[in-house]
Structure formats: C-alpha cells, structure tokens
Image (spheres, helix red, strand yellow):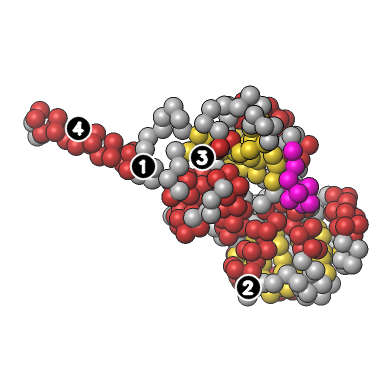
C-alpha cells in the first residue's frame, strides 16, 4: 500500500516529468502568445504525416512555430484559407482534394504553381511601408495588408523521389500514369517536361485523361501521350490516385488490361499505409517499389524553406517521417 507521502511525491515526480517533456522536447519552449502557426488542409486529413515532419523541422531550426492539421471540406476551402490569412498564419500546405481548387483562390501565383497548374503550398505575405510584399515571418507585428501566395513543390519532389528511391531517371522511359486529378496532372506535366519516351494516361473518367493529354500535347508538342493502357512493357508505373489509402481499396488499374509483370518499377504516391495493395502486388511481380514518403519529404522540405528562408533540416524531417509512418 502506498502511503500519502509517497503518493504525493509520485504525483510531483510525474508532474515534473510531464513539464520537462513539454518544455525540452521536441520543442524548447511551450506555446505562448508569440507562437506562429502553419497548417495542412485536406479532406480527409487524419492519415497525414506532415505535422510530424514539419514540427521536427521547425524544432530543429529553433523556431517558436507550430504546424497543425485540419480537415477542410472542399466547399469551405476559400473560407479556411481566408481564416488562416486573417489570423496571420505563416503558411499552409494543401493536400487532396484542394490543390487544383486553390489555383483560383490564392491572391498571387508563383511561377511553379502557374507552370504545374496546382497549389500545394501557400505563403502568407504582408505589404511593408514601401509597398513591397514580404513573408509574414519578417513582420514582428501584423501588417495591415496580407495576401496568399501559392506555390507548387510537388513536381520537383516527384522526380527527386524517383531518382533517389527507385533509381529511375524519367528521361527516355515509358511511363504508365494512373490518375489525372491534382497530383496526376502535376505528375503528367512533369514527366513530359522530363522528356519521357512515352506517357500512358489512365483515369477513372476517360474525359479527364483526354483533357490532361491535350494540355500536355499543347505545352510539350514533342511528347508522345496516349490515354490507354500500354500493349507492351513500360519502365515505370506511377500511381497518383487515392486508391490504396484504405485496406479495402481495389488496385488502381484494370488487371484485365495491364499486368504488373509489364513493368520494372512501381512508385505509389501514397505513404500511409507504407505498403499499399499496389506495392504488395508489385513486389510479388518482381518489381522495384517505393512509396510516397520521399516525395512527401521533399515537397515538405521545400515548403518549409519557402516559409522560413532557411535550408530545411532533411535528416531530422526524414527521421520524424519514418518514425511516424513505420513506427
């Protein structure tokens, strides 16, 4: 039986331990009235590993910032962005299904967003007394005028992840792209810009695949694009659909029209679960495989650099991601 004195000292010890964990770390100080915020919006959002990654990067840089996650319905995206702007958030990340919608919502589009036709990162900026727009991190107090500046960090992250995680250089390769939505559109345009030998587009809605193919052909006249499954082998299958997020999801392609034995490598942009049904099937077929963790890391690191003006601490961010996703 524990006596009153021992029980009291145990409570005090637990209290001190909780305080030390809260103060020392991952952050050096508790949230206070000067803490600044960033966030990710998605629908759904509970699967996101971005808070773990970004908060690790923020802590490594010694910033009194926090990164949050919010489930935002597409119909409320405009209001949610306006709310973050009104509360002087440093910036936002956007995930499915907001990347295309945000193109027409942000006040200013960076050339990356204009080029790839999607916004996955927003930096809030204030107008200084000389009339110049500067990142909100540079303002000690709230500026009178604030705008949202949209960027795209996904496109470069895709090719970097393919090179580093799969050893695949897109140039000269035959690629089957599954999905023509926000992520698929960016991936398709990026693959064409990287001079793939041939690009096969497959989407649940054929009209959407044809629309993307037409855009690619207009912007990259030399690109060979087809809106159908390949009849022969390809070098890479790239999944840009959301099929695989749930354990009950079907494979993101028609098995009667394509076999994974027709490809050497499979990249799934989904990172949670770490091994989707597509990746499991691809491994059984003898393919080299990788999930979307690398892409998430590189797009998130670039977003942090856009907000902070500092080099992202990749080692700390990758470690946090792997711990969060792989446990």
**Decide: marks 4, 2 in contact (CB < 8 A)?**
no
Main structural element of the magenta stretch: helix, strand or loop? helix
**Decide: marks 2, 3 in contact (CB < 8 A)?**
no
Q: Is residue 116 visible?
A: yes
On the picture, is 239 further left or further right than 33?
Answer: right
Whole-angstrom CA distance, mark 4 to mark 1, is 24 Å
Which residue is located at x 50 percent, y 58 percent? 314
* Residue 158 position (above or below residue 128): below
Q: Residues within 10 Å of mark 4 (few under 14, many from 20)?
A: few
Q: Is residue 254 visible?
A: no
Which residue is located at x 9 percent, y 30 percent? 5
Q: Quadrant of the N terminus?
A: top left
The residue pinned by badge 4 equals: 11
Whole-angstrom CA distance, mark 2 to mark 3, is 32 Å
* Residue 18 position (above or below residue 278): above
Q: Secondary structure at mark 3?
A: strand
In the image, which is nearer the foreground, mark 4 or mark 1? 1
Q: Which of 181/242 is in front? A: 181
Whole-angstrom CA distance, mark 4 to mark 3, is 31 Å
The residue pinned by badge 3 equals: 67
> Can residue 111 be found in the magenta stretch?
yes
> Can residue 85 be found in the magenta stretch?
no
Query: Based on the displayed image, in which of its 4 quarters is residue 210 positioned?
Result: bottom right
Position of residue 252 measured from the top left corner of the image (x, y, whole percent): 72, 57
Q: Which residues make up the magenta segment? A: 108-116
Q: Residues within 10 Å of mark 2 (few under 14, many from 20)?
A: few
The residue pinned by badge 1 equals: 28
The residue pinned by badge 2 equals: 167
Residue 285, numbered circle? none
């Amino acid at each position: 039986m524990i006596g009153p004195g021992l029980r009291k000292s145990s409570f005090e010890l637990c209290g001190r331990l909780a305080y030390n964990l809260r103060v020392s770390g991952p952050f050096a100080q508790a949230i206070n009235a000067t803490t600044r915020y960033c966030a990710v919006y998605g629908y759904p959002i509970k699967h996101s590993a971005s808070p773990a990654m970004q908060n690790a990067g923020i802590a490594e840089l010694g910033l009194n910032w926090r990164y949050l996650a919010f489930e935002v319905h597409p119909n409320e995206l405009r209001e949610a962005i306006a709310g973050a702007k009104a509360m002087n958030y440093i910036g936002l990340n956007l995930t499915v299904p907001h990347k295309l919608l945000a193109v027409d919502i942000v006040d200013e589009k960076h050339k990356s967003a204009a080029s790839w036709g999607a916004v996955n990162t927003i930096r809030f900026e204030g107008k200084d007394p000389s009339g110049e727009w500067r990142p909100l991190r540079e303002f000690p107090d709230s500026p009178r005028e604030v705008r949202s500046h949209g960027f795209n960090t996904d496109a470069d992250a895709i090719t970097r992840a393919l090179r580093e995680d799969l050893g695949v250089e897109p140039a000269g390769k035959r690629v089957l792209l599954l999905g023509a939505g926000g992520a698929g559109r960016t991936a398709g345009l990026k693959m064409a810009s990287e001079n793939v030998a041939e690009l096969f587009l497959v989407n649940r809605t054929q009209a959407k695949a044809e629309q993307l193919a037409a855009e690619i052909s207009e912007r990259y006249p030399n690109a060979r694009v087809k809106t159908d499954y390949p009849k022969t082998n390809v070098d890479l299958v790239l999944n840009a659909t959301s099929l695989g997020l749930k354990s009950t999801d079907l494979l993101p392609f028609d098995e009667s029209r394509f076999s994974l034995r027709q490809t050497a490598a499979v990249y799934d942009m989904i990172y949670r679960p770490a091994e989707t049904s597509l990746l499991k099937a691809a491994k059984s077929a003898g393919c080299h495989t990788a999930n979307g963790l690398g892409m998430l890391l590189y797009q998130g690191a670039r977003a942090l650099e856009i907000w902070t003006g500092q080099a992202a601490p990749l080692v700390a961010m990758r470690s946090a991601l792997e711990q969060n996703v792989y446990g």
